[in-house]
Image (cartoon, rainbow, N blue to C red):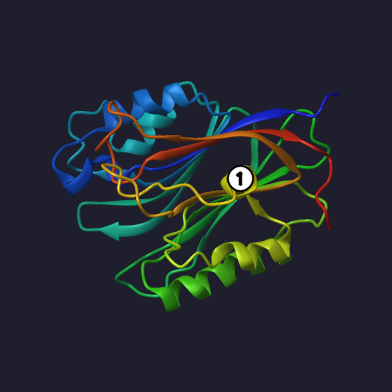
Amino acid sequence: MALPQLNIATFNTHKGLSSFNLRLTMHEQRLLIRKLQADILFLQEICGAHDRHHDLPYRGQYHFLSEDGWNFAVYGQNATRAKGHHGNAIFSKYPIVRWENENISESRVEQRGLLHAEIAVPGLDKHLHCICVHLGLMGRWRTRQILALSERVQHMVPKDAPMIVAGDFNDWRQKASLVLKQQNLYEVFEQMHGIHARSFPSTLPIFRLDRIYVRGFDVHACHVHHSLANIGMSDHVALSARLTGNGYVGR
């Protein structure tokens, strides 16, 4: 069987709100997600339930987006509020055979998690391990969370298993790659262009906060989805990459 080609995307939905929280944009976000045509999609700050989503057929952004042609979807609740909750999600066209959400919060003020799913992708001898990440804003918290991510990979992922780690790293100081390279995880924009993509704020991306790290794949293309149609849909822009399994994880 030929090694698989995968389209991967990551997007911080900002709880289905536009930049500056001016309006609900879930219908626009749903349209964007369709256009990405991702085989596996990593989402952050996606609402599992929120009473402001009164115009949706289901209660919450997670249900509204995941029903749109996705065969498998998992949601990891991180932050709980009086009127709802939000967290990370992974949508997949291939079977999710196992998943777990790890709490890596360093403060009650800022609740964070690692959503880890194993996916059975045709053409891969091992399950594909996917981790959806949303790290903290404070540097000292983020440092410990990056180490927690690295330790999870080291202890919970077989050394010969392919991996994708994607999400909002909030890595203003560009430190995550130094740690994740120890697990043979390499960022797709770094590989293709020598530098991480600008992804925040969506109105004029300056900061390089969102990432797609891979192990066991060749990177053929990567894109920042910043256009007039997408400006302000969230406070982040979506990133995508086209990958081919190479059968080698380098460990």
Q: Nearer the viewer, residue 183 or 202?
A: 202
Residue at 68% over, 55% down:
185
Quadrant of the snapshot with the C terminus:
bottom right
Return the x and y of residue 242 as percentages of the image width and height: 62, 31
Q: Nearer the viewer, residue 140 or 16?
A: 140
Name above or below for residue 40 compared with residue 215: above
* Residue that extends furthest to the bottom in the rendered view of this protein: 140
Looking at the image, residue 86 sits to the left or right of residue 182; the answer is left
Neighbour tally class for label 1: few under 14, some 14-19, many 20 plus, Cα within 10 Å = many
Please say whether residue 68 is visible from this viewpoint: no
Residue at 43% over, 54% down:
208
Return the x and y of residue 67 as percentages of the image width and height: 42, 26
Please say whether residue 110 is visible from this viewpoint: yes
Name above or below for residue 136 compared with residue 247: below
Residue type pointed to by label 1: Val
Q: Nearer the viewer, residue 249 or 60?
A: 249
Would you name the residue on which mark 1 appears?
Answer: 188
Q: Nearer the viewer, residue 221 or 64?
A: 221
At mark 1, the secondary structure is helix
